[in-house]
DNA sequence: TAAACAATATAGATATTTTCGATAAAGGGA
DNA sequence: TCCCTTTATCGAAAATATCTATATTGTTTA
């Protein structure tokens, strides 16, 4: 009997089904089954039973809930022993795109769990963020970049970020139709990895340059694109909502883009403040759950 | 942080050193180190410190003890949920040799942990025990046997049992000196696997038969051997104490015997009463610890 | 002051366990 | 009956725990 199995049990009681518990805990459903079977094996009988498609606790299960609550209570108190040490400042540098789509929920959770930490978030281009990290102005930097391989930092690859072309829904569906037209390529300031990637893509495939409109925020780019002035190349994560709601549409294209990944980086050193440590831990936990 | 790590921590506090805790828990010492390092990692600081070769709790460690006691308390209450179901009868058949040397401490532990179970132990030869198991008179049977391979039972090989020749200390040291002399071969009733094994050994190596003295109990055999009447072939485990204390001595011999193993067997079926289940579990735990 | 010792730490190899992914079975509802 | 949702099963892959052997550290002894 392991703590994680008790947590699984308690979660099922809360959410009412194995499947939901799996989703909530970031496991697959078969793992939930295995956890409960392990418990039932040790306890010598079932803790759940089914009555009319509904999950119910058995008598044994009902007895167990209270005891598990006690145990998990002690466990959480032990976990909290550390939290008081998690304080001070946490300085993060991240590009706007990542901040909004990926970091949002993580920062929320972090702020809740470690209220003693003052979070300082700066939005810059990926190159800026890297410099900030190197010269010690921030503790953690996030980047979007093609393949990365460096010894200067410890880095964690987070997601593969698909770069997509978007335009207003009434515009042409296929990117080929834009070639040679006078639509704008709407983008952000230079130094942004997917802008570089897109421009290299044009050269490689002998596509003539577009007129470029440079804007200073994601929101501005999206609005201008939605107004029909041109198209933009952006990470899918930043425009998923707009595509779903029909404000923008994703263009089809013959050649797919080179892969871009999101990274989290810290300076190479063995020791980080607890605040930084816990942040890294939390980010990696989120990643693990999402990618499953 | 896992329950086993908390148990390790609590044990160290009790016994005062990593090394002793390892012995008590049946781990190696490096495992203890790993457990504590894992805890300290999570807790963000050391729980033990050394002052003058003495192990002391840090402040953090002292805080932890109480909380761990709570947690382990809940844990034990959960474990006990099952124990009330462990009752009824447990019928075991084992040869005398195994009962005394191997089963003693296990039965003691079992009786303590599951006082509701009535243990019935019968001592017979290995062949008898097998029959008893097959016809359902007992739940578990123990045997000493050379290599075993059968589908009739579920069997667990426990130990390799070295068979040794013993005689009184004042007798000759080497078995060769006994050949052709009028010493007795002191043994127990037929049907015992190491008696069979020894007699086959004699034939195989063209050693003339000895006069045989058949006794009904291990203790009787040992006493007669100690009195100088002859020698006996017995599993080492049954005479270890006597050899150490000088009551008997182990004879040297050119050819070593065929290996004999101790086995635990149950009838092939998926379901055993909780009492039987728990017994099997306990035996296997003991084996694991001892053989490490 | 070095040598021997006792306790804990470290590193690589091995063993075990956990988790996943795909698929099957079970229980309802249409 | 067929479909849909939920849980169970099974083999493979990944992650983790433990062991063995050896190093390190601090202490006592010669």
Image (cartoon, coloured by chain):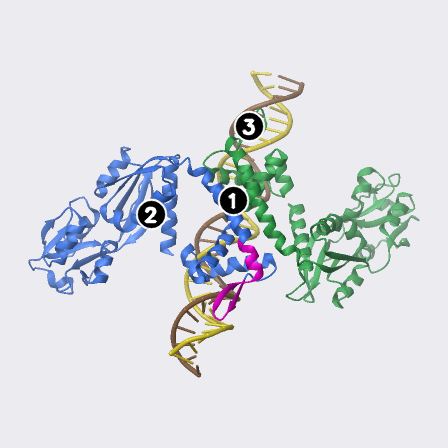
Chain colours: A blue, B green, C yellow, D brown
Q: Is residue D4 above or below residue B111?
A: below
Front residue of this view, candidates B100 and B252 = B100
Could you say which disc has been placed on residue B14 in the image? none
Which numbered disc flags the more N-terminal residue, 1 or 2? Answer: 1
Start-end of magenta stretch: A48-65
- SS for callout 2: helix
In the picture of the structure, the residue carrying the numbered disc 2 is A106
Tags 2 and 3 touching, CB below 8 Å: no
Q: Residues within 10 Å of mark 3 (few under 14, many from 20)?
A: few
Q: Nearer the viewer, mark 3 or mark 1?
A: 1
Marked residue chain, label 3: B
Q: Which residue is mark 3?
A: B50
**Disc 3 with disc 1 on a shared chain:** no
Task: Give the crowd class for mark 2: few <14, some 14-19, many >=20 residues within 10 Å.
Answer: some
Name the residue located 57 percent from the left edge and 56 percent from the top edge: A63
| Residue lying farthest to the left in this orientation | A182
Residue indicated by mark 1: A74
Residue A31: percent from left, percent from top: 47, 58
Q: Chain of mark 2?
A: A
Q: Could you tell whether B267 is left or right of A253 in the image?
A: right
A60 inside magenta stretch = yes
- The answer to whether residue A176 is above or below residue A143 is below
Q: Residue at x 24, y 37 (%)?
A: A131
C-alpha separation, residue under disc 2 versus residue under disc 3: 39 Å
Could you classify mark 1 by the number of other residues whose Cα lies within 10 Å: few (under 14), some (14-19), or many (20 or more)? many
**Is A254 inside the magenta-drawn segment?**
no
**Residue A164 falls left or right of residue B21:** left
Residue A270 point in image, percent of width and height: 39, 35
Which of these two is toward me, A154 or A273? A273
Cα–Cα gap, marks 1 and 2: 26 Å
Residue B31 visible in image: no
């Amino acid at each position: 009997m392991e703590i994680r199995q008790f947590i699984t049990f308690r979660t099922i009681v809360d959410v009412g089904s194995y499947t939901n518990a799996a989703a909530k805990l970031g496991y697959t459903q078969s793992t939930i089954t295995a956890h409960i079977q392990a418990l039932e094996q040790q306890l010598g009988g079932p803790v759940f039973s089914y009555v009319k498609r509904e999950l119910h606790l058995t008598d044994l299960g009902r007895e167990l809930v209270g005891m598990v609550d006690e145990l998990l209570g002690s466990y959480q108190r032990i976990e909290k022993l550390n939290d008081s040490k998690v304080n001070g400042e946490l300085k993060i540098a991240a590009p706007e795109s990542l901040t909004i789509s990926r970091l949002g929920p993580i920062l929320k959770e972090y702020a809740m769990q470690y209220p003693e930490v003052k979070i300082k978030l700066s939005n810059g281009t990926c190159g800026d963020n890297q410099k900030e990290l190197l010269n010690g102005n921030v503790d953690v930097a996030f980047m979007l970049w093609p393949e990365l391989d460096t010894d200067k930092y410890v880095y964690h690859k987070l997601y593969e970020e698909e770069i997509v072309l978007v335009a207003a829904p009434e515009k042409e569906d296929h990117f080929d139709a834009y070639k040679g037209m006078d639509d704008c390529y709407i983008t952000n300031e230079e130094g942004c990895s997917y802008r570089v990637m897109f421009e290299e893509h044009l050269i490689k495939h002998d596509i003539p340059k577009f007129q470029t409109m440079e804007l200073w925020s994601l929101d501005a780019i999206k609005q201008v694109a939605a107004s029909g002035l041109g198209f933009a190349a952006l990470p899918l994560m930043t425009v998923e909502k707009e595509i779903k709601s029909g404000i923008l549409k994703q263009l089809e294209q013959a050649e797919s883009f080179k892969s871009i990944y999101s990274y989290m980086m810290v300076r190479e050193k063995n020791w980080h403040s607890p605040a930084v440590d816990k942040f890294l831990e939390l980010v990696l936990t989120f990643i693990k759950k999402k990618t499953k």
